[in-house]
Image (cartoon, helix red, strand yellow):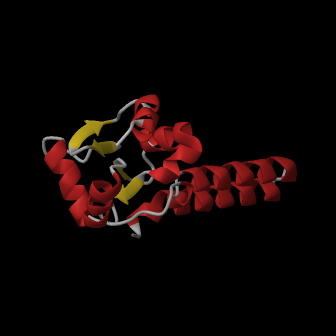
């Protein structure tokens, strides 16, 4: 769980230190802009942008019941972020598993990707798809069961 917050915390800390230095040098406007950008970057790279994660076993059982895809992701992954943003509101229909929080999820991703923890990995009807196109994932949500 802590690993997911390392990058956002570092971004805020570095931005704060840089902003403090800019304030002391007399450029408060630039300092405010730097601090705002660092906080926004931290938010984008945090787990807060993604729907609530569940465990891999729970996601797989839910997927078997409702046939919705399971997305394995991790904070800080630009491809996961791209998938999440491009899916928009439909992202809430998917079952999201944070592989940094769930060892079973990380194991499932390694099994699907020849031992690598490549994310996003989307499981649709039991078949893994590594870094799929967001439009394709949206199609999978709208297909009949």
* Residue in the picture at 24% in, 48% down: 117
Residue at 36% in and 58% down: 97
Image: 33 above or below 137: below
Residue 140 in the image, given as x and y percentages of width and height: 39, 37
Eyeballing the image, is 94 above or below 83?
Answer: below
Q: Where is residue 72 in the image (x, y as percent from the top left)?
A: 33, 51
143 vs 102, left or right, is right
- State left or right for residue 141 relative to residue 25: left
Of 123 and 104, nearer the camera is 123
Residue 123 seen by the camera: yes
Specify the quadrant of the image occupied by residue 17: bottom right
Using the rendered view, name the quadrant where residue 134 is placed: top left
- Of 119 and 3, nearer the camera is 119
Q: In this view, does 37 lie to the left or right of 130?
A: right
Looking at the rendered image, the quarter that the N terminus falls into is bottom left
User: In the figure, residue 18 lies in which quadrant?
Assistant: bottom right
Residue 123 point in image, percent of width and height: 28, 45
Q: Which residue lies furthest to the front in this view?
A: 144
* Image point (31%, 55%), residue name: 63
Q: Looking at the image, can residue 119 be seen?
A: no
Q: Which of 71 and 33 is in front in this view?
A: 71
Does residue 59 lie above or below 77 as drawn?
below
């Amino acid at each position: 769980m802590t690993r997911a917050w390392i990058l956002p915390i570092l971004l805020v800390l570095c931005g704060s230190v840089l902003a403090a230095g800019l304030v002391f040098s007399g450029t408060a406007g630039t300092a405010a802009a730097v601090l705002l950008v660092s906080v926004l970057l931290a938010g984008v790279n945090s787990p807060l942008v993604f729907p609530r994660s569940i465990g891999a076993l729970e996601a797989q059982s839910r997927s078997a019941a409702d046939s919705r895809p399971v997305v394995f992701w991790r904070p800080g992954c630009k491809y996961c972020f791209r998938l999440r943003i491009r899916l928009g509101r439909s992202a809430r229909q998917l079952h999201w598993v944070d592989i940094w929080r769930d060892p079973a999820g990380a194991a499932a991703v390694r099994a699907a990707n020849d031992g690598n923890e490549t994310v996003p990995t989307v499981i649709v009807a039991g078949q893994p798809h590594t870094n799929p196109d967001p439009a394709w994932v949206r199609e999978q949500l709208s297909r009949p069961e």
